[in-house]
Image: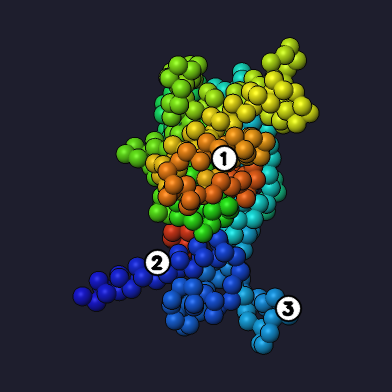
Amino acid sequence: MRTSLAASQDEVRRYNLAAVLQRLHIGGPVSRSELVALTGLNRSTVGALVTELAEQGLVVEGPGVAGTVGRPSLMVMPQPRSAIVLAFDFRVDRTVGAVVGLGGETISRVERSRQRSEFAPDLSVAQLIDMAHELLEEVPEETLWVGTGVGVPGIVNERTGVVSQAPNLGWIDVPFAQMVTDALRKEFGEVPATVTSNDADLGALAEHTRGAAVDSGNVIYISGEVGIGGGVVLGGALMTGAGGFGGEIGHMIVNPTGVECRCGSRGCWETVIGRGAVLSCIQDSKPVGDVQDVINAALAGDADVQERLAAVGRWLGIGLVNLINIFNPEVIVLGGHLGQLFSAVAEEVEEQIGHALRAPREQVRVALPALGEDSTLIGASESAFASLLSRPIEAVSESSTFVTSK
Ligand SMILES: [Zn+2]
């Protein structure tokens, strides 16, 4: 009996340590008394937990902010350089990478473009490795490296890290997480596991945890890139579906007589609101640079462009109506070019949203990402921190993965 009691006490301690570290990682510095209030634990328990986390180097205690009334309270602060992750947002046209420290501080960040000829999985992995070298240069040796997270624009089995299908990259059944881990190991020796996830799922989680939808449990994040991805958070948890493949709203068929989609179907939402659809609003011989050029042409009074862009706006609104009616979200976050598009054709979009059912329509707001272009990148870093945050002491003491070779 004694051992089972001890075991359950140990479990409770572990659970509480995780709760305290998670609170500090997401919410930033707080005083011990605030931690008492936030966790519902008593003062001496919180004190013991903070001491244990401090002994591992994950947090420090220091004087509170000057100017507070009364006796200044000691603040418990996460230590950004005690544990780091590598995070990548792997897009069709470029890759963004970062080293993120405990507490969410971005320590280094790099961005590389990619040509269509460089889509092959092995070339993609080589690019990530090259970026990892540059990113880790900023990190002192012997820093604990607790995970690597990668967002990919495709359908991903998060458990196995296999990208089942990425239509815009031409990938089918690519064991990307394993490839990245193997390549990192070759360069850096012992490395932590790689978590690979759908890019929009990560965007949804990041905006829900740290961004435009912090106080909302029902959120849809739409990534507007070459393709259109979706991440759906319902009741505070990511909707995965049976195999983790749910939320592919870009392949919702809105126009069965429309153009063929890269997924093999016809008239998917992504064919009418993806970046290509916006760029094709300018139909002359000059190559169009980006979405902003199209919007500028419309603003400058080009009637043809205005008309085509308005049509894209209506398609955006039609898809949003379907999502509002099906999921009853509180917030829909428009990532990538969809935010720019929405700002340019808000009237057309709002007009369509007016066709949604009244009750869910009255509860929804459309927002731009609070994390700017980095929603997916931040989400990837959070996925890489998950193992440390769920078992802090074990993760530190069992880990032999330090940043060593450069
Ligand atoms: Zn499709």
Q: Which residue ends up furthest to the top in the rendered image?
A: 285
Q: Position of residue 15 (x, y in %)?
A: 40, 66
Amino acid identity at mark 3: Ala
Q: SS of the residue at dot 3?
A: loop
Q: Residue 312 sits in which quadrant?
A: top right
The residue furthest bottom is 70
Q: Position of residue 63 (x, y in %)?
A: 67, 78
Quarter of the image that includes the N terminus = bottom left
Residue 217 relative to residue 314: left or right: left
Q: Is residue 123 above or below residue 61?
A: above
Q: Nearer the viewer, mark 3 or mark 2?
A: 3
**Residue in the picture at 67% in, 36% down:** 344
Which badge, 3 or 2, comes first in the chain's sequence?
2
**Residue occupied by mark 3:** 66
Based on the displayed image, in which of its 4 quarters is residue 223 positioned? Answer: top right
Classed neighbour count for the residue bearing mark 1: other residues with Cα under 10 Å, few (<14), some (14–19), many (≥20): some
Q: Quadrant of the C terminus?
A: top right
Mark 1 lies on residue = 350
Quarter location, residue 299: top right
